[in-house]
Amino acid sequence: MAVGIASVCGLILSMSLLGRKEAWTTLYTHLTPEDLTAASVELARAGVTYQTRTEEGTLMVPNEQVALARMVLAQAGLPKTGAFQVKGFELLDQTSLTASDFLQRTNYLRALQGELARSIATLEPIANARVHLNVPQPTVFEERRQEPTASVVVDLKPGRSLSKEQAQAIVFLVSRAIEGLKPENVVLVDTSGDVIWADGSSPEALEGAGDYLRLRWQAERAMEQRLQSLLDRTLGAGRASVQVSVELAMDRRHTESELYLPAEGGTQGVPATHSEVQETYQSQGAPIAAGAAGAATNLQMTPPLPVTLLGGSYSKTERKTEYRVSRRVERVEQPPGAVRRVSVAVLVRGTLTPAEQTALQRAVGAAVGLDPARGDAVVVVPVRTERPAGVPRLGRGRTPTAPFPWIWLAAVALGLLVPVTLFVAWRRRRRGAPLAPPLSEPTPEVAPQPAIPPPPSPSPLEQLRQVARESPNRLAEVLRSWLAEDAASQRTDGGVEEWSKR
């Protein structure tokens, strides 16, 4: 028992000593080798304890020395490189009165580039950044006007990558900081030469095949899990296997349509204008002179023949109506990722009647939203498999119990019983040692008893391991038997010592 108490106390003491280790604070990360070496020299000269990680460029100091370390490095002007050491609008403080317009404009662009680089470097995955701006001079001639452009280079931290939202945020940050700069005129690359944003392409479009495979895998797994759960509840666990194949449409569609419809409840539109014009003409008959045209008729002194003109009438009516037709404009934008075709294969262990197979096929089609016009297909195939000998037949909807909890319990029990086993072995060795006779009184002779030879068995530790492997439930029984035996031996030793004193 004393050995067990001592081991527990030692364990608690070691854990308390480990918990009292000194806490460190990261002062700088991703420093260049030159800055890391110079900072280490300055801290050592000032008597500040520090730790460095050359691979990551990290400088750490104890918590209570953070302020002192920052003061020492700031006094030495360290670090000298990095995004926060890039000058921004501080450049304009050094502008002289005699500076030309070109120099002032160049310094302003340099200041903008530095400020943008500082802002981009504040993102968590980015260690450093550089920004290049091309802002043409304004002109009054429209044909000579050029749009500004920008290029951004980011240095990512080891093992980190830019997310879609972060890449889009960088592009929008740069485009909104420069007047007239459009997001499609911003190029974002990393130090590995990979293009993250170019020609107005979003991160979703640049990933291309990677996004397609990811979305397709997610859609297939979701359908398979839903179908597998349905079949397990219906047919029994492990009796059916499902495989789903999904084709996605990754092109973005934008549709605009204008529809001219008649008024509601009729076949014509609403009258907008209406006009009616009516003409009527009527004349009566009258005698007129008649003769051949020409000089002969004019020179003859004979009277002209009397001709009577008959009367007549004329009537015209014109009606004009303009209708206003209903107009509806539709703009439909379909994002990428729409399902183009679904194929499902279901394998069922056992035999199915044609009616059951048809019903199962219809149920699976309804679960996945089968659309025959889209070309979807569902195939259900019964498969006859031989059950291996010795494998018990499981009931419908039941799954075999995994033995993993018993293994973990056996491992925990083994770890707890090792100290007890060592203690019991130590007590057995102590019991086997001969008792020294007292000096004052003679020890009476005790009739010798025949020694019982120990049974041939392995060591206690090996025996415990074997029991843990074969039957974890016997661990408690073995422990109780050992403790009972130890208690009996203690009573025997106490009785012998008391009898010796008498």
Image (cartoon, grey):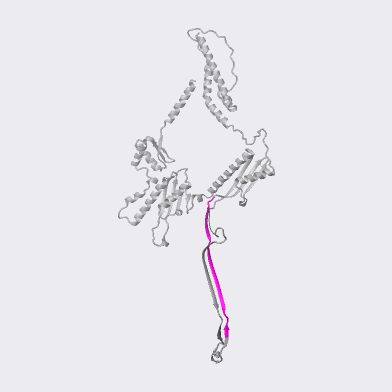
Residue 335 position within the rendered picture, expressed as x and y whole percent measured from the top left: 53, 51
Q: Is residue 285 above or below residue 76?
A: below
Residue, x 56% and y 77% (percent of image)?
Answer: 313
Would you identify the image quadrant in which residue 292 lies? bottom right
Residue 155 position within the rendered picture, expressed as x and y whole percent measured from the top left: 44, 46
Picture mark count: 0
Q: Is residue 304 above or below residue 328?
A: below
Q: In this view, does 396 lie above or below 376?
A: above
Looking at the image, the residue that sits furthest to the left is 97
Residue 435 position within the rendered picture, expressed as x and y whole percent measured from the top left: 51, 13
By secondary structure, the bulk of the magenta-drawn segment is best described as strand
Residue 52 belongs to magenta span = no
Image side of residue 410 versus residue 101, left or right: right
Residues in magenta, as a range: 307-336
Would you identify the image quadrant in which residue 76 lies? top left
Q: Which of 456 and 309 is in front in this view?
A: 309
Q: Nearer the viewer, residue 356 or 98?
A: 356
Residue 186 position within the rendered picture, expressed as x and y whole percent measured from the top left: 44, 53
On the question of residue 432 being in view, the answer is no
Image side of residue 476 versus residue 170, left or right: right
On the question of residue 188 being in view, the answer is yes
